[in-house]
Image (cartoon, rainbow, N blue to C red):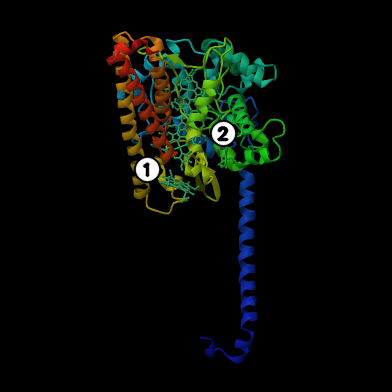
Amino acid sequence: MSEKLGPFVRRHATLLAIVAAAAVGTVVVAALLTNIIERKHEGKNRYARLVDVTEETVDAAPWAMNWSRQYDGYRRTVDVTRTRFGGSEALPEQKIERDPWLKRMFAGYAFAIDYRDRRGHAYMLADQEMTKRVTERPQPGSCLHCHSSVMPTYRRLGQGDVFAGFEALGKMTYADAHAEVVRTGSMNPVAGGTEIRFEHAKGAHPLGCVDCHDPKSMELRVTRPGFIRGIQALAASDAPVPHLPSIERWRERGAPGLYDPNEEATRQEMRSFVCGQCHVEYYCGPKTTLFFPWSNGLEVEAIEATYDGFRFDDGSRFFDWKHAETGAEVLKAQHPEFELWSQGIHARAGVACADCHMPYQRDGSVKVSDHWVRSPMLNIARACQACHPVGEDELEARVTVIQNRTRELMERAAAAMTDMLDAIGAARGSGASDVQLAAALELQRKAQWRLDFIAAENSMGFHAPAEAARILGESIDYSRQSQLEAAMWHYLPASKDRR
Ligand code: HEC
Ligand code: HEC
Ligand code: HEC
Ligand code: HEC
Ligand code: HEC
């Protein structure tokens, strides 16, 4: 090509190229600047306030005046959705009817009387108020920590001290605590507020804007005492947390004072921390204040170690209930989404809960986070394709394969657990004593804890497929070991005085 150019051009080719590039560059930069300025302008408008919202504005409706796009999404959490392993009808299906083994696993526990699929955020308070676990069993005020916009009540009861209020509400019965939340609401009537249609407990509200956003700056922040104490205990431990770089940096600085997520965490971490306020394993019972068991790390055995090492005030060891069939002191797992996500490739790659469950959508030139928090499978284009430029069908197929494999392995773990319960029952029937069955019962605790950890987690393995399989594999192994132990005492009564 160069032989066609004239001598001048040939001699000054480089110079000309630079001049041309500079000219084009200037135009592009100018265009970009104009564009950015326009967007900034719109960005500012987005935060123009028609209504003043404060720490007391637990009702989301007034916020709608300032941030209608986010509010519209938030309100859609009343909609009924369904995917293969998620979503639910008007009244969610009873998990315990669909999977009868769950009922046996929970024998003797409140979960055996009412345990349903979850649904949208709008229902969190109403569903808690009406579950038989609340209406037919005593429950503590701490239940409201994750099901209502409770911060002003904590502040009021603690006279400004959130943690004191948190302790106080946790010591009350559910009914008394609920009445306190309603009272706070009636003491802070919101100007311009309207009751949202799904709200039936006047004055009390489910998760609101104020629970994830600072009302002054609209920055993300965490508010829940359970999370703040939990993440502080995790930071203070030496458990590796490569997916939480701000904790690693804080440790490198010599771990000064207490780790403060609102000061230290990156914006990307906050996009998961706000969910970690509730979508976690926890203890919430009558014997001590609600806590997140993270002081040894987030893996299933680290949490188990925390529980095994925990002593209640009366010196007794930690368990959630005594299994009605076998008498084993067992553990109940609850929706450990934050913990399982922590073990997966997405967390390691810095992908946050909000990336998949609240993806960005464009509205004119404004980028809006979809506040209709729901299954990403209802929204694959925005939830996944931003990072994975492959067809929707292929992405869906990848998820289906992971979920089906998890489900099949879970069925096997459930079968092993059922055989274990049968074997322990048979051994008891033939006169085996508590002392003789002690080893079998400890193995039952380990087996159930692992099976329940994956069954209670809501992604059917997707958040960390290999980890989910590992945990179910261990569950099967512990169930079979326990079954062997029990069978020995059943079939070898002669060896009864070996222990
Ligand atoms: C890489 C994407 C991705 C990330 C990151 C992610 N999730 Fe998920 N999540 C999914 C998928 C896919 C499902 C399965 C949905 C289904 O079965 O319909 C799911 C399921 C769920 C469900 C059950 C929803 C339903 O409708 O069944 C909850 C709750 C959940 N995730 C919470 C979280 C939390 C909390 C985090 C962060 C700690 C998180 N997820 C991180 C993709 C993600
Ligand atoms: C204050 C506690 C709380 C916080 C914070 C919270 N959730 Fe939830 N979430 C719940 C509860 C409770 C439910 C179940 C409501 C029900 O079944 O009535 C739920 C349900 C869900 C569901 C199921 C929705 C459906 O339509 O079935 C998804 C998905 C979900 N949450 C994801 C998230 C994500 C992602 C975040 C962070 C951006 C988050 N949640 C923050 C408590 C919370
Ligand atoms: C640490 C936060 C947290 C605490 C404390 C908490 N929940 Fe929840 N709860 C959730 C989340 C997250 C979900 C949605 C995920 C799921 O259903 O697995 C949920 C779902 C539920 C549901 C709907 C699904 C079901 O299980 O039938 C009910 C009812 C419920 N909780 C009742 C209670 C009661 C009663 C207490 C007190 C003993 C309580 N919760 C304490 C976070 C919490
Ligand atoms: C469960 C936590 C949660 C709740 C509740 C919540 N948000 Fe958000 N919000 C987020 C997250 C996560 C982002 C993304 C922020 C980021 O990336 O910095 C966000 C972003 C925003 C933004 C910035 C622009 C955008 O869309 O990204 C606004 C404005 C906003 N939310 C308003 C609201 C309003 C109004 C409500 C109540 C109707 C609300 N939010 C409730 C988690 C929440
Ligand atoms: C913000 C970016 C981002 C989003 C959003 C995202 N992913 Fe990913 N995904 C990644 C990265 C990065 C990896 C790791 C790739 C690697 O290291 O090879 C990954 C890995 C995967 C893998 C391989 C998992 C494994 O264990 O090997 C699957 C499957 C996957 N993603 C599916 C999804 C689906 C389905 C969604 C939507 C629900 C989604 N991703 C959303 C970035 C993302």
User: In the image, what residue occupies the spot 54% across and 87% down?
Assistant: 2
Residue 272 appears in view: yes
Sort mark 1 into few (<14), some (14-19) or many (20+) by Cα contacts within 10 Å: some
Describe residue 80's horizontal placement relative to residue 373 as left or right: left
Does ligand 5 reach within 8 Å of label 1's beta carbon? yes
Q: Which SS class for mark 2?
A: helix
Sort mark 2 into few (<14), some (14-19) or many (20+) by Cα contacts within 10 Å: many
Q: Which SS class for mark 1?
A: helix
Q: Quadrant of residue 221?
A: top right
Residue 448 place in picture, x, y as percent = 40, 23
Residue 384 place in picture, x, y as percent = 44, 47
Q: Residue farthest to the bottom? A: 7
Q: Name the amino acid type tagged 1.
A: Val
User: In the image, what residue occupies the spot 52% across and 50% down?
Assistant: 364
Quadrant of ligand 1: it is top left
Q: Earlier along the polypeptide chain: callout 1 or callout 2?
A: 2
Q: Nearer the viewer, residue 48 or 247?
A: 247
Q: Nearer the viewer, residue 52 or 491?
A: 491
Q: Is residue 274 above or below residue 392?
A: above
Q: Is residue 157 above or below residue 333?
A: above
User: In the image, what residue occupies the spot 67% across and 16% down?
Assistant: 158
Describe residue 117's horizontal placement relative to residue 220 as left or right: left
Q: Quadrant of residue 28?
A: bottom right
Query: Which residue corresponds to mark 1?
Result: 399
Query: Which residue corresponds to mark 2?
Result: 274
Residue 296 place in picture, x, y as percent = 56, 29
Mark 1 and mark 2: Cα distance apart in space: 25 Å
